[in-house]
Image: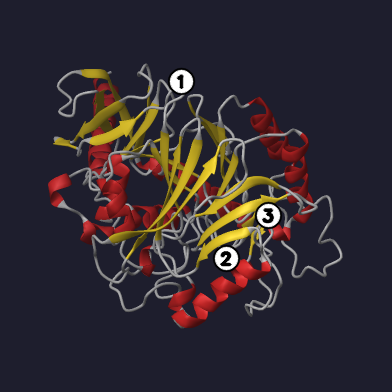
């Protein structure tokens, strides 16, 4: 009896010793620690919020423990900037299975209200974040910043720093290319000390996690997330260049199984972005801002996009089976359009929707086959649906091109405008003047507006963001541009402004 008791005690002691050793293992070194601000320990990646509803919002942080193991995290949210009177609070645990990220769906909140939130763990407190819930069943003004293409290697996030200074936004809408998958020195400004980690093209879950960790250590990216709720959608570079549901231009056989890579990229995205989780990991959704705006976010990459064609002359170019959204998402999208009670239907769309003739610009194709021009059957279906159902006040937003655009979206026969489309420039990713003399870029801009009469404005040179301001009477689009990317700067300028009156698909400068 005593022998067996001694044996059991010895086993328990050994197990306890093993458990203690496990918790004492240092966290893996991914190279990002060089960017840590020790004043934020252990919340080096700051805080973020997103997907605001009338009564809830996602709040996010990431804890960086010194040792592997489960971490207990407290959180609180308040209408007071000092969090002296929390309206909601709680506790949660995180661990390496979530890359130590924390997401809370803070509920029971009031509509159209500014809140402040904070996390606490490992004897430290996070910076205090600011967020805002959406309106409910009211006609209130809504102001959205629309951004895309935040390539870390391409320059400093001066535009994000300017967005962080604003106090008039309901949310920041990120249309994709939040990260870039390339290895260091492959796509960006090689003269800057902003090299990608890990030092290779990212393929595995660990790779994607490290790349997000690096991006989210940039102080300007952190500040923009800290001050505003984000509503995000992925484009292609969150996985690989020119991705579609079963492959990508930038995925070769030596990169391994594509579906494994895609699922790893999606997992890291849901871990690191303040988006609301769901069982299917589909990301298309609608965010309602009272009776003023329904923001309809589309997934034009991973849900339904079929393989692209090589040319407009390919036999199946107009095939009915070639889709950008896929049948299920398309049906959902049509339903969102017809059932919306909001004055403005803002479409969070990744790539240019309007037809755009780029012949003569030297791209080897008369249209951009990666945009909606490469999927004409489904694009025409959507346009016809909007026209036939007389759906008013549709504004399509687009990223991807790193340039600014303003279209009066034509019907299939070109006789009427069925919607308005605004393209936002990149925050940093390279555009035409980084590879072409400015005078030639200006000529290209003039050529584009000449051969595309429905294109009222384009800017292929500047980096920055788009502000959309909506009231029941009108929508106003403003493009703000920064002066440089190769060094920190607090200068920006208003580049262009258009007004769209409710019920009229016409741009007024």
SS assignment at label 1: loop
Instruction: Give the CA separation, mark 3 to mark 1.
Output: 42 Å
- Give x and y (percent) for residue 241: 56, 63
Residue 85 visible, this angle: yes
Q: Which residue is mark 3?
A: 246
Q: In the rendered view, how is the structure colored?
A: secondary structure
Q: Judge from the rendering whether residue 33 lies leftward or rightward of residue 389; answer left or right.
A: left
Q: Judge from the rendering whether residue 167 lies leftward or rightward of residue 177; answer left or right.
A: left
Instruction: Give the CA separation, mark 1 to mark 2.
Output: 50 Å
Q: Residues within 10 Å of mark 1 (few under 14, many from 20)?
A: few
Q: Nearer the viewer, mark 3 or mark 2?
A: 3
Q: Which residue is mark 2?
A: 255
Q: Nearer the viewer, mark 3 or mark 1?
A: 1
Quadrant for the N terminus in the image? top left
Lower position in the chain sequence, tag 3 or tag 1: 1
- Give x and y (percent) for residue 215: 34, 56
Q: Looking at the image, which residue is at 22% across and 45% down?
A: 24
- Residue 258, numbered label: none
Above/below status of 463 relative to 7 = below
Q: Say which of 298 and 469 sits in front.
A: 469
SS assignment at label 3: loop
Above/below status of 275 relative to 308 = above
Q: Which residue is mark 1?
A: 138
Q: Say which of 350 and 366 sits in front.
A: 366
């Amino acid at each position: 009896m005593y022998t067996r008791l001694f044996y059991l005690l010895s086993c328990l002691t050994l197990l306890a010793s093993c458990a203690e050793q496990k918790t004492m293992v240092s966290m893996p070194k991914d190279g990002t620690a060089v960017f840590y601000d020790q004043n934020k320990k252990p919340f080096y990646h700051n805080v973020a919020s997103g997907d605001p509803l009338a009564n809830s919002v996602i709040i996010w942080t990431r804890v960086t423990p010194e040792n592997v193991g489960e971490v207990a995290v407290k959180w609180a949210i308040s209408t007071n900037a000092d969090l002296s009177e929390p309206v909601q609070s709680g506790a949660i645990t995180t661990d390496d299975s979530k890359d130590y990220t924390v997401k809370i769906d803070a509920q029971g909140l009031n509509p159209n209200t500014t809140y402040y939130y904070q996390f606490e763990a490992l004897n430290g407190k996070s910076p205090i974040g600011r967020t805002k819930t959406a309106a409910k069943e009211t006609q209130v003004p809504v102001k959205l910043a629309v951004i895309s293409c935040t390539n870390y290697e391409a320059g400093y996030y001066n535009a994000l720093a300017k967005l962080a200074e604003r106090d008039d936004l309901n949310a920041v809408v990120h249309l994709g290319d939040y990260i870039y998958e390339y290895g260091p020195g492959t796509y960006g400004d090689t003269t800057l000390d902003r090299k990608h980690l890990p030092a290779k093209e990212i393929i595995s879950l660990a790779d994607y996690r490290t790349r997000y960790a690096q991006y989210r250590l940039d102080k300007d990216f952190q500040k923009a997330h800290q001050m505003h709720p984000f509503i995000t959608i992925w484009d292609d570079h969150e996985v690989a260049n020119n991705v579609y549901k079963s492959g990508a231009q930038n995925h070769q056989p030596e990169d391994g199984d594509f579906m494994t890579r895609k699922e790893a990229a999606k997992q890291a995205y849901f871990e690191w972005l303040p988006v609301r989780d769901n069982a299917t990991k589909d990301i298309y959704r609608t965010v309602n801002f009272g009776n003023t705006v329904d923001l309809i976010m589309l997934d034009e990459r991973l849900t339904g996009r079929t393989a692209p064609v090589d040319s407009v002359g390919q036999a199946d170019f107009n095939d009915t089976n070639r889709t950008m959204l896929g049948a299920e998402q398309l049906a959902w999208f049509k339903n969102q359009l017809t059932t919306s009670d909001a004055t403005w239907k803002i479409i969070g769309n990744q790539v240019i929707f309007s037809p755009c003739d780029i012949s003569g610009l030297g791209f080897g194709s008369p249209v951009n086959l990666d945009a909606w021009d490469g999927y004409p059957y489904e694009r025409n279906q959507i346009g016809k649906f909007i026209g036939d159902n007389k759906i008013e006040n549709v504004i399509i937003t687009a990223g991807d091109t790193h340039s600014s655009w303003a279209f009066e979206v034509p019907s299939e026969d070109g006789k009427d405008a069925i919607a308005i489309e605004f393209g936002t420039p990149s925050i940093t990713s390279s555009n035409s003047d980084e590879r072409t003399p400015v005078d030639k870029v200006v000529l290209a801009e003039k050529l584009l507006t000449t051969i595309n009469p429905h294109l009222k404005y384009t800017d292929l040179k500047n980096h920055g963001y788009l502000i959309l301001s909506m009231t029941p009477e009108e929508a106003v689009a403003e493009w703000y541009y920064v002066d440089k990317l190769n060094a920190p700067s607090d200068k920006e300028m208003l580049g262009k402004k258009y007004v769209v009156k409710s019920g009229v698909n016409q741009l007024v400068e």
